[in-house]
């Protein structure tokens, strides 16, 4: 059955032990990897961490997903540079969730895999007394959002940490865009915008065919099923919604009940040929559960979406896009913050050699431009003090922020940075007060946007 292991999960949720994993006599953090099916689970272990035990306990059903995960860990252990020394203790069986909770061999569960099960896994792990580090998305639809709310409430009661992996906060251009937006002399204040020209726009383009750790990534077949992976509007868009909250309202609590107003949302598919599907999944034909999405021999994956909404009183637009393979470069990111004195823009196209670049484009009048440049050169020193080596380069309509290579450590390295941040929170016994409400806010935004997009699509289809 397509969701057989989900049935094991639902039965077991009624019989969870309330005993928490003990760490009183062991200062080490012990990791558990639960049902790994996405390469992000392995990337958490591309680095070693102080105070984290080198033995990792893996619980999953036997199969290709598990085998590929273990191969990646083995590859990191034998890397030419900075090899790791993880030891994987693996339990293979359909009752892997029950065994994980009964065994209680670790205190942090890493969850990155089939998103159809993820929210229920999170809920089960928290009920079992484990801290959870989960890949995005934590919830792919409105029903799972309700379950996620319960999990967060339960984690608070049990004094456990539940945290998602937001790697884009560690990308240097995103960091500097946030820093500059907080300097009134450079940015002014964030405009309110309008539905026609939002104050904040972000777009992320991803590709099914890509390289990870120097090798062509093999994706599981279920990754192409949006009922298991989630649609783009509820998956990749999570990063964008998170960045908007994190950068535009830094360290502030966002309450989804009053701070978010959805205006419109849309979704559309990426068409994948059978040969393309076979190339990225190492399969030999579409599995039965994907036949529902095949039309005229093409697999239609609803991986693209757009959300238009208001965050407090600021108009925002985010777009998540997927294509099969990049003609040049790789995944890319575009973002603009419109301020009263300047726009802060990230571009990652051919002109940037497909590497993210940050620009300051002033919007002051020509008469005030000289004074603005003086203020910019003065206040940029605040940023330089935090990030030595940062410089400004004059361009036609403003300035490019020149960023030393030492800060450009790449997407894969960001997983270690997020994990390190999570481990620090764990050691301190808490997270910043805004993290949990803001996680709920972003998943409310994406899951409600998906519901709205489906509804608007049906109305359009019926000519209403």
Image: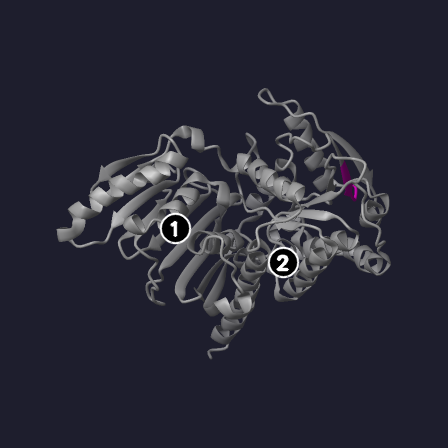
Q: Residue at x 64, y 49 (%)?
A: 430
Residue 188 versus residue 55: which sits nearer the camera?
Answer: 188
Give the residue furthest to the left: 367
As helix, strand or loop, the secondary structure at mark 2 comes to loop
| Left or right of 217 on screen, residue 86 | right
Whether residue 102 is visible here, answered yes or no, is yes
For mark 1, does the 10 Å Cα neighbourhood hold few (<14), some (14 to 19), or many (20 or more) residues? many
For mark 2, does the 10 Å Cα neighbourhood hold few (<14), some (14 to 19), or many (20 or more) residues? many
Residue 224 versus residue 33: which sits nearer the camera?
Answer: 33
Q: Residue at x 28, y 36 (%)?
A: 392
Q: Where does the image place residue 189, in percent across and percent down from the top left?
A: 33, 57
Instruction: Assign the N terminus to one quadrant of the image.
Output: bottom right
Please report the bounds of the magenta region as a residue range: 57-62
Give the residue furthest to the bottom: 464
Q: Where does the image place residue 20, in percent across and percent down from the top left?
A: 81, 49
Whether residue 217 is visible here, answered yes or no, is no
Residue 419 versus residue 297: which sits nearer the camera?
Answer: 419
């Amino acid at each position: 059955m397509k969701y057989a292991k989900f049935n094991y999960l639902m039965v077991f949720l009624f019989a969870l032990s309330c005993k928490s994993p003990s760490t009183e006599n062991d200062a080490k953090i012990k990791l558990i990897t639960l049902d790994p099916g996405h390469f992000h689970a392995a990337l958490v272990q591309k680095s070693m961490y102080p105070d984290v035990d080198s033995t990792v306990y893996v619980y999953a059903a036997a199969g290709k997903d598990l085998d590929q995960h273990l191969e990646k860990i083995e590859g990191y252990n034998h890397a030419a540079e900075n090899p790791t020394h993880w030891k994987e203790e693996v339990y293979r069986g359909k009752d892997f969730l029950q065994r994980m909770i009964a065994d209680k061999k670790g205190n942090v569960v890493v969850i990155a895999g089939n998103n159809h099960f993820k929210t229920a896994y999170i809920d089960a792990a928290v009920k079992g007394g484990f801290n959870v580090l989960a890949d995005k998305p934590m919830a792919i639809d409105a029903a799972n959002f309700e379950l996620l709310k319960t999990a967060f409430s339960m984690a608070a009661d049990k004094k456990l940490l539940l945290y998602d992996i937001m790697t884009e906060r560690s990308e240097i251009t995103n960091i500097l865009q946030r820093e500059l937006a907080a300097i009134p002399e450079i940015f002014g204040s964030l405009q309110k915008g309008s539905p026609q020209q939002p104050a904040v726009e972000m777009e992320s383009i991803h590709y099914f065919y890509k390289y990870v750790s120097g090798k062509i990534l093999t994706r599981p077949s279920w990754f192409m099923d949006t009922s298991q992976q989630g649609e783009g509007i509820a998956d990749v868009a999570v990063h964008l919604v998170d960045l908007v909250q994190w950068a535009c309202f830094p360290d502030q609590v966002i309450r989804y009940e009053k701070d978010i107003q959805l205006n419109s949302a849309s979704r559309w598919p990426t068409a994948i040929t059978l040969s393309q599907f076979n190339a990225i999944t190492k399969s030999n034909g579409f599995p039965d559960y994907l036949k529902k999405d095949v039309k005229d021999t093409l697999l239609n994956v609803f991986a693209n979406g757009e959300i238009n909404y208001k965050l407090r009183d600021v108009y925002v637009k985010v777009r998540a896009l997927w294509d099969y393979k990049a003609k040049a470069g790789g995944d890319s990111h575009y973002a603009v913050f419109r301020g009263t004195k300047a726009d802060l823009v990230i571009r990652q196209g051919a002109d940037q050699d497909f590497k993210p670049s940050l620009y300051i484009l002033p919007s002051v009048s020509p008469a005030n431009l000289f004074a603005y440049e003086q203020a910019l050169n003065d206040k940029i020193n605040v940023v330089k003090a935090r990030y030595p080596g940062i410089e400004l380069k004059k361009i036609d309509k403003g300035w490019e922020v020149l960023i030393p290579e030492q800060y450009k450590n790449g997407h894969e390295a960001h997983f270690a940075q997020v994990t390190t941040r999570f481990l620090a929170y764990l050691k301190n016994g808490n997270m910043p007060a805004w993290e949990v409400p803001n996680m709920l806010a972003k998943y409310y935004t994406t899951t409600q946007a998906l519901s709205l997009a489906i509804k608007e699509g049906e109305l359009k289809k019926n000519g209403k």
